[in-house]
Amino acid sequence: MSHTLIAILLLPIIFTFWAIIDLAYRDIGSLKKKALWGLFVVLVPYVGGPVYLIFGRRQKKTGNPEL
């Protein structure tokens, strides 16, 4: 039972770190948008990471799209 509890607590933390690293390397448009996502991920750690990975990664860079 303790392994399940540890997994439940660590999984959102892993998603948060994954979101922070992805956000650092991904070009999602403006610096303001990146900063807002970063603040959201850091200030709401158990929810921010998964929300960014679901919705934030879908955002395309504005401008000239690469095919």
Image (cartoon, helix red, strand yellow):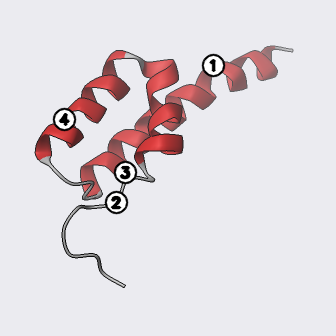
The crowd level at tag 2 (other Cα within 10 Å; few <14, some 14-19, many 20+) is few
SS state under label 4: helix
Mark 4 lies on residue: 35
Q: Amino acid at mark 4?
A: Ala
- The residue under label 2 is 60
At x 22% / y 42%, what residue is drawn? 34
Q: Is residue 58 left or right of residue 28?
A: right
Figure check: 10 above or below 20: above
Percent across and percent down for residue 4 are: 80, 21
Instruction: Give above or below for 29 relative to 3.
Output: below
Indicate which disc, 3 or 1, sits on the residue closer to the N terminus. 1
Between the residue at mark 3 and the residue at mark 1, the CA separation in whole angstroms equals 21 Å
Return the x and y of residue 52 as percentages of the image width and height.
44, 38
Callout 2 secondary element = loop
Name the kind of residue labelled 2 in the image: Lys
Which of the two discs, 4 and 2, sits closer to the camera?
2
Sequence-wise first label, 3 or 2: 3
Do the CB atoms of the residues marked 4 and 2 lie less than 8 Å apart?
A: no
Q: Nearer the viewer, mark 1 or mark 2?
A: 2
Q: Which residue shows up at 23% across the image and 31% down it?
A: 36
Query: Which residue type does callout 3 highlight?
Result: Asp
Place residue 28 in its image quadrant: bottom left
- Between label 4 and label 3, give the one nearer the viewer: 4
**Upstream in sequence: badge 4 or badge 2:** 4
Which residue is pictured at 23% across the width and 61% down the height? 62
Neighbour class for label 4 at 10 Å: few (<14), some, many (≥20)?
A: few
Location of the C terminus by quadrant is: bottom left
Please state which amino acid type lies under the numbered disc 1.
Leu
The Cα atoms of the two marked residues, 1 and 4, are separated by 26 Å
Q: Which mark is residue 22?
A: 3
**Residue 63's spot in the image, x, y percent?**
19, 68
Contact? badges 1 and 2 (CB < 8 Å): no
